[in-house]
Image: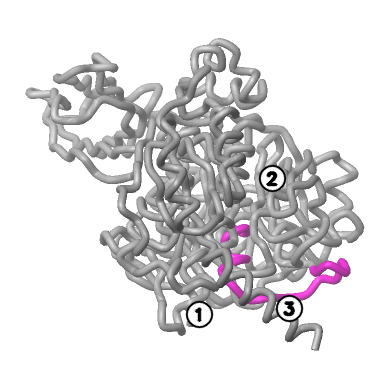
């Protein structure tokens, strides 16, 4: 009877106050930008600043916090609750009736409103990215592990060959964004993390508290595949990395506010100097069907969380994301943010490297290869909240298994950018030359990726030289000895190819005047190998 009364009250409330909607409210500007850019420690940690300085990533208005007076004014508006905020996209996530949300347009600093229910939208969704570069690493560790049940999932990717060279994630920082981490502070497989002070902190964006060792058990299992350690039973792929734990998924239901929590967490991760973000979450269908995505929305730039992931890449981080487990459903394709162009999207195979029939399919709706790579996601070795070593299925585990090895690879190749690390992981995969909708580029080989990366670093020192860089129009190319021709490919901040040209030693130049101003990633392919770097269009 009590439950029935509760339902009646909710219905009455809905009739009296109108259907509650979710929306993003975008602001026109960021007052105080000059102060923050002149005082960067007010918005980023020293570690984050050092990471950016090492790879030439400048500070810009994207890094500046949302203006507090704007947030306060929205909070004080009748019928409005502010659920989350994003400095990268300069907006707040609000909840209220359609009328109350639309009334916010009367505030002179509101640029536009984007309802989660797309049928209610009358203004376009703003989208602007400031393109930047990469990150800083250190390497120093030792490893001789007995992997136990985790042997197959690590050796399949030749991750053990990185570990044997003492690349176990030491000095790297990984953020895990999930639904909770109960048992991590008590379970034996995580004790090594605490003994070595490797868990640096975290935040629960759902509850608005520091309580991360609560909530759902999914995050606990995910973390165990990267950072867990029980000799002879389970060893994570990056057992010596630093970790931040962020709760962004609300186990009580599915709502777009979880996308906003994720973006807030990614922003915090950036400010703390995180290198790799693992996301074993994905969104396509919500409790309110009006909020659902269509396949057309899986285009790398529509979903709020995807746009946040795109900005995360421009800040120098590398996001590793589960492809999803929906291949056998009415929406078999990847969700968001797995569609982000520069996230490493990971599908699932079994111990014999056969496709897991639940692993979500590509490509993205705009035709890009997705998933990017595959890893074991069938009977993956994990630890549960009781500290027991067991097994579980899902791309939720193939993603962190891969993320840990991405961190190890980056530890080994500290001079490379996130774009270069992403490319060499893709290039190392066994179907790189013939990708498909199930496997993407296939199963990566991290030992091969290391060799490719060492070649990229060597090429950067002894290979092609681009000048002038920055340039407004013509860029010249200085060829290494005995190389007569090459192909240059230039990608924008979304990973989209914007220029491709064959260049010969006797006419060694190309024109970038047709590109918009910004920072781009290039690759040069020749008999000398592949060289990658950044080029700036002034």
Left or right: 537 as drawn, with respect to 26 = left
- Give 508 or 161, whichever is nearer the viewer: 508
Tell me which label, 1 or 2, sits earlier in the chain.
2
Left or right: 360 as drawn, with respect to 512 = right
Q: Which mark is residue 253?
A: none
Q: Which residue is mark 2?
A: 168
Residue 69, above or below 39: below
Tell me the SS state at disc 1.
loop
Numbered circles on residues, count: 3
Alpha carbons under labels 3 and 2: distance apart: 53 Å
| Relative image position of residue 275 (x, y in whole percent) | 59, 38
Dot in front, 3 or 2: 3
Q: Which residue is mark 3?
A: 6
Farthest left residue in view:
507
- Give 352 or 101, whichever is nearer the viewer: 101
Tell me which label, 3 or 2, sits earlier in the chain.
3
Q: Which residue is mark 1?
A: 358
Q: Residues within 10 Å of mark 1 (few under 14, many from 20)?
A: many
Dot in front, 1 or 2: 1
Alpha carbons under labels 1 and 3: distance apart: 38 Å
């Amino acid at each position: 009877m009590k439950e029935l009364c509760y339902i009646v009250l909710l219905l009455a409330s809905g009739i009296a106050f109108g259907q509650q909607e979710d929306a993003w409210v975008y602001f026109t500007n960021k007052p105080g930008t000059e102060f923050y850019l002149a005082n960067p420690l007010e918005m980023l940690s020293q570690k984050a600043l050092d990471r950016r300085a090492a790879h030439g990533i400048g500070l810009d208005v994207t890094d500046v916090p949302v203006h507090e007076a704007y947030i306060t004014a929205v909070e004080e508006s009748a019928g409005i609750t502010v659920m989350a905020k994003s400095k990268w996209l300069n907006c707040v996530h609000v909840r209220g009736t359609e009328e109350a949300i639309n009334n916010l347009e009367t505030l002179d600093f509101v640029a536009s409103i984007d309802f989660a229910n797309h049928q209610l939208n009358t203004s376009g969704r703003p989208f602007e990215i400031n393109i930047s570069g990469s990150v800083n690493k250190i390497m120093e560790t030792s490893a001789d592990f007995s992997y136990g049940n985790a042997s197959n999932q690590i050796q399949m990717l030749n991750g053990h060959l990185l570990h044997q060279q003492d690349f176990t994630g030491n000095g790297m920082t990984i953020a895990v964004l999930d639904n909770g981490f109960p048992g991590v502070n008590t379970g034996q497989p995580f004790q090594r993390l605490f003994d070595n002070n490797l868990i640096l902190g975290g935040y629960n964006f759902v509850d608005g508290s520091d309580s991360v060792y609560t909530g759902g058990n999914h995050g606990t299992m995910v973390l165990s595949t990267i950072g867990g350690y029980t000799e002879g039973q389970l060893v994570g792929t990056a057992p010596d990395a630093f970790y931040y734990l962020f709760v962004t998924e609300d186990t009580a239901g599915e709502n777009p506010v979880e996308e906003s929590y994720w973006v807030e967490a990614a922003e915090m991760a950036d400010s703390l100097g995180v290198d790799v973000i693992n996301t074993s979450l994905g969104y396509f269908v919500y409790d309110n069907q009006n909020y659902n995505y269509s396949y057309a929305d899986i285009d790398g730039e529509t979903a709020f969380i995807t746009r946040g992931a795109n900005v995360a890449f421009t800040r120098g981080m590398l996001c590793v994301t589960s492809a999803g487990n929906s291949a056998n459903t009415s929406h078999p394709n990847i969700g968001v943010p797995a569609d982000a162009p520069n996230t490493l999207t990971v599908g699932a195979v079994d111990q014999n490297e056969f496709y897991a029939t639940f692993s979500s399919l590509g490509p993205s709706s705009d035709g890009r290869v997705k998933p990017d790579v595959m890893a074991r996601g069938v009977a993956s070795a994990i630890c549960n909240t009781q500290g027991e070593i067991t097994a579980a299925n899902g791309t939720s585990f193939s993603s962190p298994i891969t993320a840990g090895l991405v961190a190890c690879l980056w530890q080994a190749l500290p001079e490379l950018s996130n774009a270069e690390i992403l490319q060499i992981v893709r290039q190392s995969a066994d179907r790189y030359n013939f990708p498909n909708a199930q496997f993407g580029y296939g199963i990566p080989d991290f030992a091969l990726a290391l060799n490719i990366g060492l070649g990229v670093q060597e090429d950067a020192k002894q290979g092609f030289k681009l000048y002038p860089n920055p340039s407004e129009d013509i860029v010249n190319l200085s060829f290494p000895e005995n190389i007569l021709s090459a192909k240059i490919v230039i990608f924008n901040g979304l990973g989209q190819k914007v220029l491709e040209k064959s260049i010969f030693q006797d006419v060694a130049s190309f024109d970038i005047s047709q590109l918009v101003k910004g920072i781009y990633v290039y690759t040069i392919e020749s008999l000398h190998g592949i060289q990658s770097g950044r080029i700036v269009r002034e």
